[in-house]
Amino acid sequence: MHEGLHTIGEMARLSGLPVATIRYYSDQGLVPPVARSPGGYRLYDDEALARLELVRTLRDLGVGLATVARVLSGAQSLAQVADRQAAALEARIQELRVRQAVLRHAASHGTDPATVTRAHRLAALAAGQRRRTVADLIGEATRGLDMDPGFAARLRSMVPDPPDDPAPAQLEAWVELAYLVSDPDFRAAVRAAFERHATDRASGADRGDPASWRRAERAVLDLAGAALAEGVPPGCARARAVVAELVAVFADAHGRDDDAEFRRWLAERVRVGADARVSRYLALLAVVDGRPTGPDPVPVARWFLSALESSAA
């Protein structure tokens, strides 16, 4: 008996691999025997056992046999192979995340086959293509309109900047965001809102600026939000007092007088802000960009709209 050498059966026992697999690797030259027994059986030393363990490890990690052979021969370093394999796995993981996000979207929204197909196509886009998908929405919605420069700059910040390697939550948000911006009804609603802005700017109906508009929006969240949280009915006297305070803030922000015409004009604009799709867009945008999401403004906007309309009745 050859001392310190192992039969193929012992190699199988020590490595946990089937004899047939070890014989195949041996035939391929990956783990050649170092000797033969008097009966012609293959014999392996401890170095061959170590090679066998490396072959098994690389195969478990998805490395092809040809690449394994190059590593064993020294033609390619283990570090190079590991780096390339890690990149390939990352791409595969990202592909699986896309599938998972699309399936979760389909499961939660009950979408039809055509919608699932569209969502999958949009989700599979590269980060730059994803960004352009939303940028196209903004471009289409504002094309040919005279926009306030500050407002236009604010719109540019509403285009997501998705990472090349999004987290699962970001990818799921992107699937829903891409589906939303591809919805013709949503695109038409966004275009109509921007057309109103351009018309108000051209007619002088809106003489404010983005900073003053943001202050007015903040006042709605604070004042109307507090009233909503306390359960104040939109048609009561206290609600009318809140409306009067907020209308004064908006009139100042837009350079207008607080009269019946302005209140009708304001109600139309608040109704846009009460669109749940706009709120959802902003929430998804924050997730895709990796920013914290704020409170949903839609319930507050709807309370204010109802109180504003009640005060005019």
Image (cartoon, grey):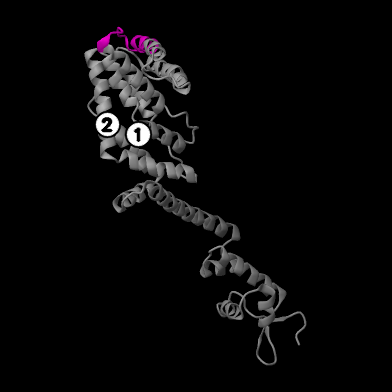
Tell me if I can see residue 123 in this picture: yes
* Residue projecting furthest to the right: 3
Residue 240 position by quadrant? top left
Specify the amino acid type for callout 2: Ala
Residue designated by label 1: 277
Residue 146 visible, this angle: no
68 is higher (above) or lower (below) than 96: below
Query: Residue 78 or 117: which is nearer the viewer?
Result: 117
* Span highlighted in magenta in the image: 245-261
The answer to which of marks 2 and 1 sits earlier in the sequence is 2
Q: Quadrant of the N terminus?
A: bottom right
Give the percent coordinates (x, y) of residue 223.
44, 16
Left or right: residue 199 versus residue 221 is left
For mark 2, what is the residue? 189
**Is 224 in front, or is 233?**
233
Quadrant of the image occupied by residue 132: top left
